Image (tube, helix red, strand yellow):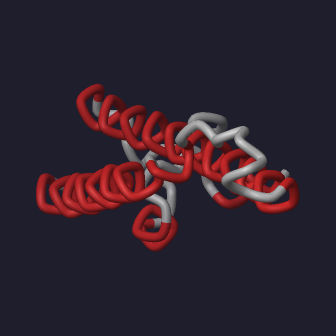
Amino acid sequence: MNDESLQEFRDLIAARMAELDAEDHMGEAGQATVDLDQQAVGRLSRMDALQNQAMAKATSARRKTERARLQAALARMEEGEFGYCEDCGEDIAPGRLRLDPAASRCVDCASG
């Protein structure tokens, strides 16, 4: 993979990391502690707030996992391993990497 292609994927990863940071910032309010005062909020409203909090925490965990995958892709770039399947060693299709620059396996290995 040439330097121009690597830079394209670095830019894609940086853009996605920025999106994740923005989503984290927006999701902070949803993870806040739910007030247990039933005089201020009804029981069902509180249950709904707890459910929303749980979903916000799960979404945050997914973003954390995606961020780790993207950082691993950057590490593979530094090692000269980016774009090669970790199972079979063949090239990963550029189109697949454009859709998911953190992909570490080719389509055949990922589906098998």
Q: Residue 88, position in %: x, y?
A: 64, 39
The answer to whether 2 appears left or right of 26 in the picture is left
**Point 40% across, 68% down: residue:** 98
Does 68 sit above or below residue 28? above
**Quick one: 4 or 91, which is closer to the camera?**
4
| Residue 1 visible in this rendered orientation of the protein | no
Does 73 sit above or below residue 3? above
| Residue 107 visible in this rendered orientation of the protein | yes
**Point 51% across, 67% down: residue:** 96
The answer to whether 10 appears left or right of 64 in the picture is left
**Point 66% across, 48% down: residue:** 53
Q: Residue 76, position in %: x, y?
A: 36, 33
The answer to whether 51 appears left or right of 3 in the picture is right
**Quick one: 51 or 96, which is closer to the camera?**
51
Q: Residue 91, position in %: x, y?
A: 48, 53
Q: Residue 103, position in %: x, y?
A: 53, 51
**Quick one: 26 or 23, which is closer to the camera?**
26
